[in-house]
Image: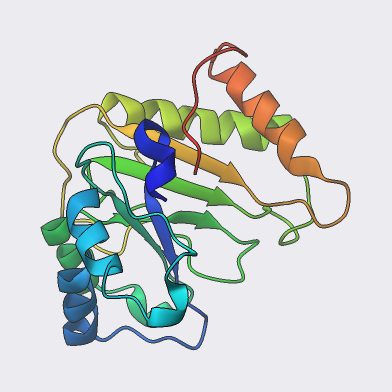
Amino acid sequence: IFNLREKLGPILWQFPPSFRYDRSRMRDFFELLPKDTASAAALARKRDPFMKGRTRLAIDESRALRYAVEIRHESFKHESFIELLHEYNVALVVAETARLWPLLEDITADFVYMRLHGDKEIYRSGYSAKSLDRWAARIAAWRRGTEPADAKKAAPKLRPALQPRDVFCFFDNTDVKLRAPYDAQMLAKKLKIPRDAPALIQ
């Protein structure tokens, strides 16, 4: 990841549907995460011997690391989990999964991370113009530092700071007709993002 340099975006951690929420376990996990590339490189140097010569651990400068967590078990719909994410500035992934797993829109970090897997059929269905309009409005609100009035939240009493945020949005509905590139282009158009706008590599 150090080769990405200034293009390095947030690092995603996705937990399986069988993984249940445990506050102390999650806190321990967040405590282990390196805060920047310098501390990540120091951690990586403890690698097993068989990895020597297969990795690049040099960094151009120490850059802050950002993390996002995608949950897939109902037990994470808990106020204490949202509080924990706030405490560590870890983003809760806004994941649309055709109602298969929880869709939460609690803003827990200084950025927003979205994964759109399909609204009707996971990994397969494309997004209608109406659906993309809805997501574009939500992205615009998060970008401004506000929230949609109808946001689905596990901790509605917790209000994020009113500040502009980076918003990362990924489409993962590619299994049948490779809809992700088309839907991403349509969403960018609705948000008036120029085609030649610089992008981060995730």
Is 129 or 176 nearer to us in this picture? 176
Q: Position of residue 29 (x, y in %)?
A: 23, 76
Q: Residue at x 22, y 85 (%)?
A: 25
Position of 153 compared to 117: left or right? left
Q: Quadrant of residue 117?
A: bottom right
Q: Position of residue 41 (x, y in %)?
A: 26, 58
Is 35 or 93 nearer to us in this picture? 35
Q: Residue at x 24, y 26 (%)?
A: 164
Q: Residue at x 21, y 44 (%)?
A: 64
Q: Quadrant of residue 23?
A: bottom left
Position of 177 compared to 110: left or right? right
Q: Position of residue 127 (x, y in %)?
A: 72, 41
Position of 145 compared to 112: left or right? left
Q: How is the image coloured?
A: rainbow
User: Compared to 55, does 134 lie above or below?
Assistant: above
- Residue farthest toward the right in the current orientation of the protein: 177
The total of numbered circles placed on residues is 0
Q: Quadrant of residue 33?
A: bottom left
Q: Position of residue 116 (x, y in %)?
A: 59, 49
- Residue farthest toward the front in the current orientation of the protein: 53
Q: Can residue 99 be seen from the camera position used here?
A: yes
Q: Can residue 150 be seen from the camera position used here?
A: no
User: Compared to 29, does 9 lie above or below?
Assistant: above
Q: Residue at x 15, y 54 (%)?
A: 158
User: Compared to 110, does 57 lie above or below?
Assistant: below
Position of 70 compared to 101: left or right? left
